């Protein structure tokens, strides 16, 4: 592609000048691989952006979307509906084993988060407890880029230029501690007590002012922070004790990333609301879904007649997204994707931890089909070393993702041992070359 033609797309979360000087352009995708515009195969170590659990161009999903676009290209869902949106909602309830009674559709993870926060606030209002307006997030949390999401989020770079943010927000401390927990497989031992910080926040503001706590069960975008053993259980207990809603932001962990349907299943901790997106449609059509306990919804249905929640998106429940999501759920079932991911999980984990001892590697962490590789930063140049690893690995034909000096891996769940060998063979070789 002619570089002079690349100046008008202001790319998201991208070093635009660096990219445009040396572009990386993908042209097609199938299964575990992308192909770039020069025809080189690139192993997808990140499922796009944590989006493609079933592998790329999955034939059943492609066909479902193609059929739907020819049949019902668009239909609104305000005061009118279409069957696929209802069918999908029922199938999603089955997928949660009916632990949730309702689903609200959005078009992205950011919108799912803001929807979850708004439902939490409106729920307290609906039952006559409108003083509960405070939202509690966590340091290093990533909840997308809406004003709600960045307000409860805890990544400084995503917040600092966009103030003022939502008032009445407080943050739990993050749980990352390399001194105590480096090179852990699965949940680290140290840190459950950090959940008790919620008691401190409750004591400060009083429970009667707090609407909800939102956390990612495994924080992804900040660089794979795995919750300490017992931490999420403790958060759950404290929220229940004080009548505070617990929201899990499962935008990356939902739909199989931990080899279970949701992280809530993996950790056996049930939030009141879950925000999801990404893997829901295998990334093919943008969609988010917010899962809500039936009793939360009931509080709205007990109110006056008329519109119960003044919220929604033009594209909530878009027919193409519904078709993609229905087909994705079928692929999960038919191909027993979770069982397959479980069957390669220990091989995957061994491969990650085989990188121990390579230059600059200060931590390796892993859970489900996620890995985090933390590199020592070059003094005065945070993020530069991992970004160099990203560029070199891409040139070798493997896609990884970096955030600061942490490499995050999250491949499609369809991966096989040969892909794991290729991914870690090439990544390990690159790590050895880094200055
Ligand atoms: C936990 C979490 N929440 C929300 C989002 C935002 O999703 P989107 O980029 O689809 O708006 C992300 C994206 O990575 C995420 O990881």
Image (cartoon, rainbow, N blue to C red):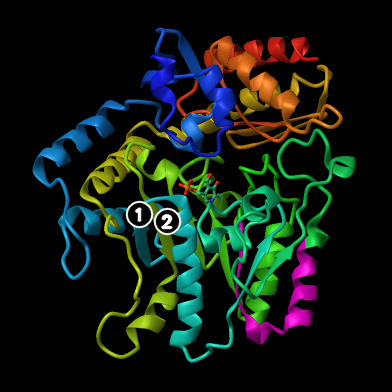
Residue ID for mark 1: 92
Where is residue 288 drawn, in percent x and y? Answer: 39, 52
Identify the secondary structure beneath mark 2: loop
Left or right: 214 in relation to 103: right
Check disc 2: other Cα within 10 Å, few if <14, some if 14-19, many if 20+. some
Where is residue 239 drawn, in percent x and y? Answer: 65, 73
Q: Is residue 320 above or below residue 296?
A: above
Q: Is residue 99 visible?
A: no
Check disc 1: other Cα within 10 Å, few if <14, some if 14-19, many if 20+. many
Q: Is the residue under label 1 in contact with that under label 2 (CB below 8 Å)?
A: yes
Where is residue 9 drawn, in percent x and y? Answer: 42, 33
Q: Is residue 214 magenta?
A: yes
Q: Is residue 338 visible?
A: yes
> Which residue occupies 16% across, 55% down?
75
Q: Is residue 365 magenta?
A: no
Residue ID for mark 2: 96
> Which residue occupies 68% across, 59% down?
232
Instruction: Report the span colored magenta.
Output: 195-215
Q: Which mark is residue 9?
A: none
> Which residue occupies 30% across, 53% down?
91
Left or right: 54 in relation to 220: left
> Which residue occupies 64% across, 84% down?
209
How far apart in space, not on screen, are marks 2 and 1 (Cα)? 6 Å
Q: Between residues 75 and 335, which one lies in front from this camera angle?
A: 75
Where is residue 38 drawn, in percent x and y? Answer: 41, 7
Residue at the extreme left: 71
Identify the secondary structure beneath mark 1: helix
Q: Quadrant of the N terminus?
A: top left
Based on the displayed image, in which of its 4 quarters is residue 271 positioned? bottom right
């Amino acid at each position: 592609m002619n570089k002079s033609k690349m100046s008008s797309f202001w790319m998201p979360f991208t070093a635009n000048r660096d990219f445009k000087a040396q572009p990386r352009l993908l042209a097609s995708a199938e299964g575990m691989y992308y192909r770039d515009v020069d025809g080189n195969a690139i192993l997808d170590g990140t499922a796009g952006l944590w989006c493609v659990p079933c592998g790329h161009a999955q034939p059943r999903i492609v066909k479902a979307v193609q059929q739907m676009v020819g049949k019902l290209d668009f239909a609104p869902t305000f005061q009118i509906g279409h069957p696929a949106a209802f069918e999908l909602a029922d199938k999603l309830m089955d997928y949660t084993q009916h632990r949730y009674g309702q689903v609200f559709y959005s078009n992205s993870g950011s919108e799912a988060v803001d929807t979850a926060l708004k439902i939490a606030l409106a729920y307290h209002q609906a039952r006559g407890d409108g003083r509960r307006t405070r939202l509690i997030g966590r340091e290093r949390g990533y909840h997308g880029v809406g004003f709600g999401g960045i307000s409860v989020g805890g990544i400084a770079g995503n917040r600092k230029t966009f103030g003022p943010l939502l008032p009445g927000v407080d943050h739990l401390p993050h749980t990352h501690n390399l001194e105590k927990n480096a090179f852990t497989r699965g949940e680290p031992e140290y840190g459950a007590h950090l959940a008790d910080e919620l008691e401190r926040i409750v004591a400060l503001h009083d429970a009667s002012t707090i609407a909800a706590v939102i956390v990612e069960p495994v924080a992804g975008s900040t660089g794979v922070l795995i919750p300490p053993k017992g931490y999420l259980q403790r958060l759950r207990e404290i929220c229940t004790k004080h009548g505070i809603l617990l929201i899990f932001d499962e935008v990356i962990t939902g739909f199989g990333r931990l080899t279970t349907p949701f992280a809530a299943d993996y950790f056996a901790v049930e939030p009141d609301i879950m925000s999801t997106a990404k893997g829901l449609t295998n990334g093919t059509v943008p969609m988010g879904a917010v899962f809500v306990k039936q009793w939360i919804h009931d509080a709205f249905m007990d109110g006056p007649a008329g519109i119960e929640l003044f919220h929604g998106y033009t594209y909530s429940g878009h027919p193409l997204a519904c078709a993609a999501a229905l087909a994705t759920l079928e692929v999960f079932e038919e191909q027993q994707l979770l069982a397959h991911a479980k069957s390669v999980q220990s091989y995957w984990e061994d491969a990650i931890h085989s990188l121990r001892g390579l230059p600059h590697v200060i931590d390796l962490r892993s859970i489900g089909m996620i890995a985090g590789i933390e590199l020592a930063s070059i003094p005065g140049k945070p993020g530069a070393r991992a970004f160099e690893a990203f560029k070199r690995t891409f040139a070798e034909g493997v896609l990884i993702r970096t955030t600061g000096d942490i490499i995050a891996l999250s491949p499609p769940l369809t991966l096989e041992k040969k892909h794991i060998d290729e991914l870690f063979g090439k990544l390990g070789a690159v790590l050895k070359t880094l200055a």
